[in-house]
Image: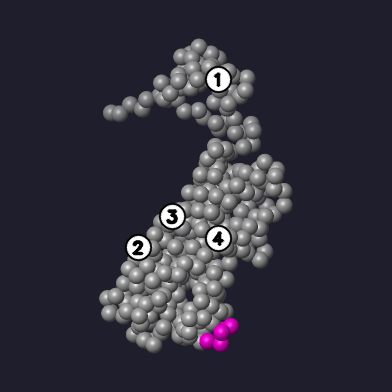
Amino acid sequence: MTTVRKSPTMADVARLAGVSPMTVSRAFKADSSVSSATRDTILKAADDLGYVFDSTASNLRSQKTDFIAVTIPSINNANFAETVRGLSEGLKPRGLQILLGYTDYDMAEEERLIEQFLRRRPEAIVVTGGRHTPRARRMLENAGIPVIETWDLPENPIGHVIGFSNADAVRGMVDHFVAQGLTRIAFIGGDASRDTRGADRRAGFIAAMQAHGLDATTRLIAAGAPPISIREGAAAMGRLLETLPDTQAVICVSDLSAFGALTECQRRGVAVPGKLWIAGFGDYEIAGIAVPALTTINPFPNDIGARTAALILDVLDGRQVTPARIAISPELLIRQSTG
């Protein structure tokens, strides 16, 4: 039978350090009334005992929880991981921690997570995208804490916004292809009803093609529910090559689907970029090491996270008192897959 060892208490630390429990509490809160020498003695005693300070009671008194709630669509997407990394690094110096939840591209799940997070009273809440269920939006509007929408530039933001127009980013890519003389351009994407950012990229493709007087809908290839995998990108490219072999270029909703499309072309002996151009979105690591390297769009995910962290600190410290709208400018990276 395993016996659970009793956790050391603040009183245990106080006895070992030769101070009162109140002094121990002040030391862990970096109270200026505790000298550095006494604090070092207390921290060493706590370390020797394996003691971890319980901040719950202190937080209840101060009405501060010291965590930021964050929702992301996927936990295995490199772009969102980079955003969380930039956010975490920016908050770390202030001792703020991230409570992370992933929505799996499901707005109903986002709504559930928002409710759960708000029950815990975070210092701020960061959500991915600018579209939410009506109930989720009401909860965010009445949260009483800073709300930051990222990875998007919604027309009717709830509070603060840090992101970019996914539609405009893809429009720029279409414009580049048309300037190179291409007219038969396809788009490989997913379930537009679930992936709102993917839907915006698809809409940007359609708008740009129509602006150039080109066929905007014949070459729209669905690829399954988001996030689109490499395998699904390959399958979509296979269908495109079989039904519309005269296609000159393909824009994919992400670099993963673009890599799948590229490998399917290689499997079928279709030369890229000799016969067909392929481009992705996201500037994932795989895009740069593919052969040929994939043309893509860099949305600067780490910068989104870092600037979100800086904004949160500005709001909490009273330096930012009006809603901020910070636009990121994605970069079109032309590589070997488009000639």
Q: Nearer the viewer, mark 3 or mark 1?
A: 1
Amino acid identity at mark 1: Ser
Which residue matches tag 1? 36
Earlier in the chain: of badge 1 and badge 4, it is 1
Residue 140 visible here? no
Q: From the top left corner, tell me how far across and down residue 117 is, in percent.
A: 56, 48
Earlier in the chain: of badge 3 and badge 1, it is 1
Q: From the top left corner, tell me how far across and down residue 294 is, in percent.
A: 40, 69
Q: From the top left corner, tell me how far across and down residue 317 is, in percent.
A: 67, 41
Q: Secondary structure at mark 2?
A: helix
Which residue matches tag 2? 289
Which residue matches tag 4? 151
Amino acid identity at mark 3: Ile
Q: In the rendered view, would you say 251 is above or below 182? A: above
Amino acid identity at mark 4: Trp
Earlier in the chain: of badge 2 and badge 3, it is 3
Query: Could you tell me which residue is drawn at 32 percent across and 79 percent down?
Result: 271
Q: Is residue 213 magenta?
A: yes
Q: CA distance from mark 3 to mark 1?
A: 41 Å
Earlier in the chain: of badge 2 and badge 4, it is 4
Q: Secondary structure at mark 3?
A: loop
Q: CA distance from mark 1 to mark 4?
A: 43 Å
Which residue matches tag 3? 75
Q: CA distance from mark 4 to mark 3?
A: 15 Å
From which residue to which does the magenta span run?
A: 210-214
